[in-house]
Amino acid sequence: MADRYDAIVIGGGHNGLVNAAYLARAGLRVLLLEQRHILGGATVSEEIYPGFKFSVFSYVVSLLRPEIIRDLQLSRHGLTILPLESTLTPLPNGDHIYRGPDPHETFRNISRFSTRDAEAYREYGHAMYQMAKAVKYILGIRPPDPTSFHPREWLALLKLGRHFLGLGEENLYTLVKLMTMSSADFLEEWFETDPLIATLSASGIIGTFLGPRSPGSAYVLLHHYMGEIDGVFRAWGFQKGGTGGVAEAIASSARELGVELRTNARVAKLLSRNGRATGVVLENGDELHATTVISSLDPKLTFLKLADPSDLPDDLVNAVRNFDTYGSSGKVNLALDAAPDLACLPGDGAHLRGAISISPSVDYIETAYDDAKYGKFSRRPYIDAIIPSMIDPDMAPPGKHVMSCFVQYAPYKLAEGDWESQREAFGDAVVDSLSQYIPNLKKIILHRQVLSPWDMEQQIGLTGGNIFQGELSLSQLFFLRPAPGYAQYRTPIRGYYQCGSATHPGGGITGAPGRLAALEILKDLRK
Amino acid sequence: MSTDFDVIVVGGGHNGLTAAAWLAKAGRKVLVLERRDKLGGAASTEELIPGFRFNTGAPDAGLLLPRIIQELDLHKHGLDFVDSPVAAFAPQPDGSAVTLWRDAERSAFEIATFSASDARAFLAFQKQNERFAEVIASLAQLRPFAISNNSIRLMTAWARFALGVRRLGRRDMMEFLRVLPLSAYHYLNEHFESDALKGLLASFSTTGLMQGPRASGTAFMFLYQQMGGANGGYRSSLVPRGGVGQLSSALAHAAQGFGAQVRTGAPVQSILVASGSVHGVRLSTGEEISAKSVLSSVDPRTTFLGLLGAPQLEPRISCRLRSLKLRGSTATVHLALNGVPDFPAATDPQLLTGTIVICPSLDYAERAFDDAKHGRVSTHPVLEARIPSLLDPGYAPAGKHTMSMIVRYAPYRLREGDWESRRERLADLAVETLAQHAPGFLSLILDRKVITPLDYEREYGLAEGGELHGQMGLDQMLLMRPVPGFIGYHSPIAGLYICGAGAHPGGGVTGAPGLNAARQANAELR
Amino acid sequence: MPIPTPLHSRTSTLCQTHEWRDWSGYLSAATYQPSHETEYFAVRNAAGLLDVSPLYKYEVSGPDAARLVNRVVTRDLAKCQVGQVMYSPWCDQDGKVIDDGTVARLAADHFRLTAADPSLRWLQDVGYGMQAEVRDVTTQLAALALQGPNSLAILRRLFPDPRLSTLRYYHLLQTEFNGQPLTVTRTGYTGDLGFELWIANDYAPALWDALMAAGYGYGLIPVGLAALDMLRVEGGLLLIEVDYTSSLHARIPQQKSSPFEIGLGWAVSLDKHDFIGRQALLKEKKGGSPRAFVGLEIDWLDLERLYGAANLPPMVAGRASRIPVPLYASGKHVGQATSMVFSPLLKRYVALATLRADCAQPGTELEIEVTVEYVRRRAAARVARLPFLDLPRKKAVSRG
């Protein structure tokens, strides 16, 4: 029967693709179903305006697991990550902080504000390197179940304990701090220059509904430090041709491994019989059969929509309902007629090939968060802008540019009005905030695309528009992700698995959930 | 070398006195040195306004470990609790009110009048919290373990504790682990729909914290505050008869009964150290008193950077003490009243005998915190008011009453102005907020006394006015408390221990740090 | 991008080779002329002038200044009188070396420290709670090193100050140049007679010119880092991040070293009151250190033999090499040579090395890895006493 597969993967985001590729690599006949016309999920490049290519949603790569790059031979399939090595923080008084690839230059730049901080910066990078090393181990393992009496789980816990004790006392303290503190508090133990703290702390709030002073945001700081590009820690990068290139590379590898990739195929329901998955039914009514079905969607869709909640235990249904997927970030993509010109550093320069961070003070970001807490988008938001066409000229017509602005905060639900009516007002707030530092910006905007969490939900199906498929908070990490007792990629329905960012180790373009889930599935199949 | 004492306890607050009494009972020669003229520290009852007595800092002693009462025989020394069937009464902006009773069933019955689903959820929620609070209570009596080189005895104690947690059952255990780092905001939203109930419950989830209910870890504080048990869903809040200060006197009597000496008006100026070991203290008069060990119940920053001095410590330790988050966030307004305030929502005068809480929603509490976060006094503060004179006549002259109101938030560091200029403004905001629920309240006020975080620092020696001696966030707990590198009650200086709220398990009138530190010091006394 | 030093206007016109190195973010000439050996010999036979401004410099002052500095360094500051300079390492709380440098006692409560790495934070943190101020003067103060046998004569031409002639090794003199305060210390990084001059940035170029003019006829030439590296190895002087790793930058604990392990045991005063790392160092002193810092001489004949087998003469670098090379004793790895140079004066191929303590006795026979025509070989080497070159003039005081 043509409609019969070993495994069906629901959702063609990067995790779904990785999962499918690994399963096919083990010899399974795999079908992947994507609802949109294009693969990639939040990892897509689209030519929204003729000649201008955008990494529509996710815009930087730093976390893609090196073992996946190797196993799926992604470099051969087009993965090319260009370095993004600097961050510029323009300040309201016309000054700026520029941190680039030359450590001495960065030292001098920070020294203008505080020599202590310049010195601390090197040690901070060093400490974060140690932390990334410590946590890297966790990224590569399936979370053990601390409540289980199974010797396998005990062994895993024991190994985990040994790993952490092996870090040494000082590193462990730092790790505990990272897991529990607010990013601003954590950074204030190192630094005294407010805009520096603000800019660094901003990577602790990206994608979360937390402010820099909210406990728990320091962990996200680390999450963003864990990136490796070909073995280089904490380097952000930009995929040539836009982030979609990452998904295309994985898809190409999957295709070569024999995965059947089907787009415009929205799954309506999981098929199951006697507590066992048997396939899926598409919205057009087609039934497709497989003994293994994997959902890379968020748990609300995986358990409450695709599966029948009445087939599931109450504690899981409750946990999934309580799973926090409240989105907080927006995206503004700009097509520009010319290069932006910064007031603090006029003209061309290396700073245009790095990130431009609108984070002049911790209070600025915290105030932006205050707006969001009560259902308003930030009137003065935190913005992380990059100009991909500066690094990869193919992204825009010659002389023209694309600018990608990641914006926080844009709460999923607005207290007044809805996103349909507020979207452009939000876009205006972003452009106004940027214009303060980029005086020529308004004059050079040709097109503008504004995306709210609600739009992300509408367009790519992320419930709540949370870019990590679910908040990266301590209560939703490791053996609690996405739900206590269901963190090992399996579900109560036999043959039904989950592999999205809502599973361990979480969001970002890591591919790790997809890979770890595949390894668990293969373990089950071998039994 | 002969010394004057086995142990000197610096600070005569409830933890210092607990430690002193326990050590004296164990046969040690103990001296307690209190800077002020009276004992009790922030857990005292004082006549702040002539004729009117107030529980100056802590409003109750509901968290006190029962074993301290038993082991030190505090009942014999005059400790007794006043109880009210009402735990908390929370008037709402719309004129209604929510009441929590000591009897949870009764509370549920009341909740049902405005939300059937909340009433259903409440009992199960309350039972779960009781189970969790019990785990935390047993944790409070354990000494934190070090990263390595733990004694077998300590590890056995922890293994027993772990087994206890496992005995919760698989589901509860997972839930416990999930809830600990959760915010009260999420925890309450997961269970309830009514703003009034959530606001009331959230009011004590940030006790002493410079955090709002959205902060991760406030669910832990929510559970910690229920450690005393028998609270019906509100925080444990029993008041000693005669005032909270009565606890301190009972402890002091007990300590003296066991032979300890207690000196008040004796400020310690420095802790004396020679080659890495403590050997006594010097008073501000210049008098030196030697001892084999010193237990400090003063907050860790003052103890180590003030009394001991940073140059005695490794730089990394003094850096950590400098960044210790104390962050006082609470002021108290004490009022002498000419009568009982009239709350139209209080259908029964008995309702006022518990805690009167103004915190109508989670957002209300969060907004109050927003002000503080930006260095301002909360425009719409969260209030926890008590009228102890309703149940215990000793507080005020006949026919008159005293009210003590905990006002949150009052940040220690104000962005504009100083506490001298903001003190009365804060009190005005507080009484006006309450007056919205009790017409005529303002005219009952005979006199008032405001204690700001700065006053707590100056008068009561709490650095930054931080009542917890170190904010009880997840980052300053267990082996991170007070700062990494201090294991248990030890400090880097041999013979010098912390026995105050800065040590595990933390703040509140529990006596646990005092008790635990005393046991540890006693075991190690040369 | 490295930036110019305060002396760049002078060094850049003299640097014929345009061979610059990045020293702490500053442009530093590696060589001025095509032959670095000329520069090397200038220092050993006449005089050389070096721009050492990129050194990090700190001033500590206030009533507790001595207490602060004494808590930082491992040597006993009580023995450092006003007018004296002291070389010392300093450690973290575990007794592992953070950095090494000099401490100049300008007044009873005023010190100037030099360091290889930025150290403001550490000095301030150690001094927290003391009445002392730590100021970073790195970017305000230029430093010139005048080194070599003729250095004293050149200085005397410029400064008729009679105190100069009697200025003892590791002592300082405060004088003036063009009306500006100038500190002259009899210190250096060459193992030779020499001085270092400390002056505010703006006056440094004029001082450079004056020195060059005074040195005319005395064989004075500017000297770059390539020659300096050879000089310091001969002098047995170690270099941070080459011969040892600062404990602040070590990635793993094994990369850290105690002062005992880098040959600075003599600079640890365990009996002085208290300093950072003392407890750990006391323990190490008692239990012994696992590693030792030694000199090493490579057996030239054996080297000739190895290269000869490939029909080559010994191919050794003319400059000092900073590439660590493994060392073996009875076939087992026992350490590494970290700086290596063929001494033009001694005609010996020597190295600074870190070795397992039991192999560190002078005279111990070892083997060193040598790559001969892409093939790894081992040549004989012997542990030698440091310094390789011990010049009496370095410390000598003239009597007039």
Image (spheres, rainbow, N blue to C red):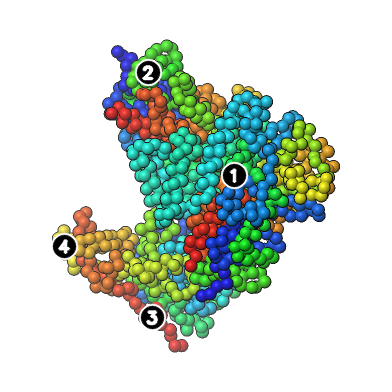
Residue extending furthest bottom? Answer: C399
Where is residue A198, by image quadrant? top right
Q: Quadrant of residue B250?
A: bottom right
**Can residue B60 be seen from the camera position used here?**
no
Q: Is residue B521 left or right of residue A95?
A: left
Q: Do the residues labelled 4 and 1 touch (CB within 8 Å)?
A: no
Q: Is mark 4 on a helix, strand or loop?
A: helix
Q: Nearer the viewer, residue B352 or C131?
A: B352
What residue is disc 4 on?
Answer: C308
Q: Mark 3 lies on which chain?
A: C
Residue located 54% across and 77% down the image: C174
- The nearer-to-camera label among 4 and 1 is 1
Q: Do labels 4 and 1 share a chain?
A: no
Q: How far apart are marks 2 and 3 (CA)?
A: 95 Å
Name the front one of labels 1 and 2.
1
Residue position for label 3: C393
Q: Do dots 2 and 3 share one subunit?
A: no
Amino acid carrying label 4: it is Gly
Please state which of the two labelled residues, at mark 2 or mark 4, is closer to the viewer: 2
Q: Distance between the residues labelled 4 and 3?
A: 39 Å
